[in-house]
């Protein structure tokens, strides 16, 4: 009997995504499906379209085991299907010529000049933009995974210096977060949210 594909709305995906810390060990995400998830994540918006994120995907079990002490022995690191280290590009301005390669020469020169001027005139901008835009992609990654039937959890608890050393991450990239993705062994717990009136300020303080 053929199965009817059930369409899940964006609202259902957003509200259905909860942080999962117990994953089913041994579940493999097919390469094509993983690439779909990563492609969806990579469609996130970014300043000047510089796409500041890089996804360092760790799927080999032995390599996930190497990450276990770095993530302070959080078991989702080794039980999840893949562990995605989301990196921010501190030199994203160097990508501008490629991003604007097909643009008219006048527009290309204007945009590259604007980008390089911003990066050169504000030393803090590179890190701010790297983290800001990689975070957009990280959230989109978790939603894309959920839309494809997988669960995830954003992890900020890890030894950054040990991670950089263990995975040979170049100085150009700053680790933003680690996201294990896989099939939940136990559902994530929905957490309470502050009332909207405590979160929203209209017009001005």
Image: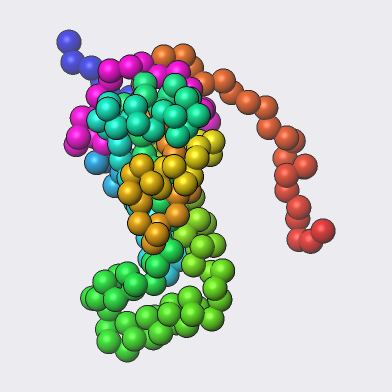
Q: Which residues are magenta?
A: 15-34
* Residue 93: quadrant of the picture: bottom left
List x then y, in percent, for residue 79.
37, 21
Residues 1 and 79: in front is: 79
Q: Quadrant of the N terminus?
A: top left
List x then y, in percent, for residue 189.
56, 20
Position of residue 61 in the picture relative to residue 185 (left or right): left
Residues 58 and 129: in front is: 58
When the figure is inspected, residue 55 is found, relative to residue 184, above or below; the finding is: below
- Main secondary structure found in the magenta portion: loop
List x then y, in percent, for residue 43.
35, 53
Residue 33 seen in render: yes
* Residue 157: quadrant of the picture: top right
Position of residue 112 in the picture relative to residue 33 (left or right): right
Q: Residue furthest top?
A: 1
Residue at the image point whose x is 20% and y is 30% from the top: 30
Q: Examine the structure image and report whether residue 19 is included in the region drawn in magenta.
A: yes
Position of residue 31 in the picture relative to residue 169 (left or right): left
Residue 140 seen in render: no
Residue at the image point whose x is 27% and y is 27% from the top: 62
When the figure is inspected, residue 177 is found, relative to residue 54, above or below; the finding is: above
Q: Residue furthest bottom?
A: 106
> How many dots with numbers?
0
List x then y, in percent, for residue 156.
53, 39
């Amino acid at each position: 009997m053929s199965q009817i594909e059930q369409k899940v709305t964006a609202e259902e995906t957003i509200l259905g995504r909860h942080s999962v810390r117990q994953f089913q060990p041994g579940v493999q995400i097919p390469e094509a499906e993983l690439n779909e998830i990563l492609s969806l994540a990579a469609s996130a918006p970014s300043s000047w379209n510089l796409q500041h994120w890089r996804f360092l995907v760790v799927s080999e079990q032995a390599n996930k085991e190497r990450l276990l002490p770095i993530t302070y022995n959080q078991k989702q690191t080794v039980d999840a299907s893949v562990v995605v280290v989301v990196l921010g590009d501190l030199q994203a301005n160097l990508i501008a010529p490629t991003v604007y390669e097909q643009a008219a020469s006048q527009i290309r020169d204007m945009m590259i000049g604007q980008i390089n001027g911003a990066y050169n005139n504000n030393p803090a901008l590179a890190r701010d933009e790297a983290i800001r835009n990689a975070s957009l992609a990280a959230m989109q990654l978790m939603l894309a995974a959920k839309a494809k039937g997988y669960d995830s959890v954003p992890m900020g608890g890890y030894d950054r210096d040990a991670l950089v050393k263990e995975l040979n991450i170049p100085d150009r990239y700053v680790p933003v977060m680690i996201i294990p993705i896989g099939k939940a062994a136990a559902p994530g717990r929905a957490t309470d949210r502050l009332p909207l009136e405590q979160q929203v300020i209209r017009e001005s303080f």
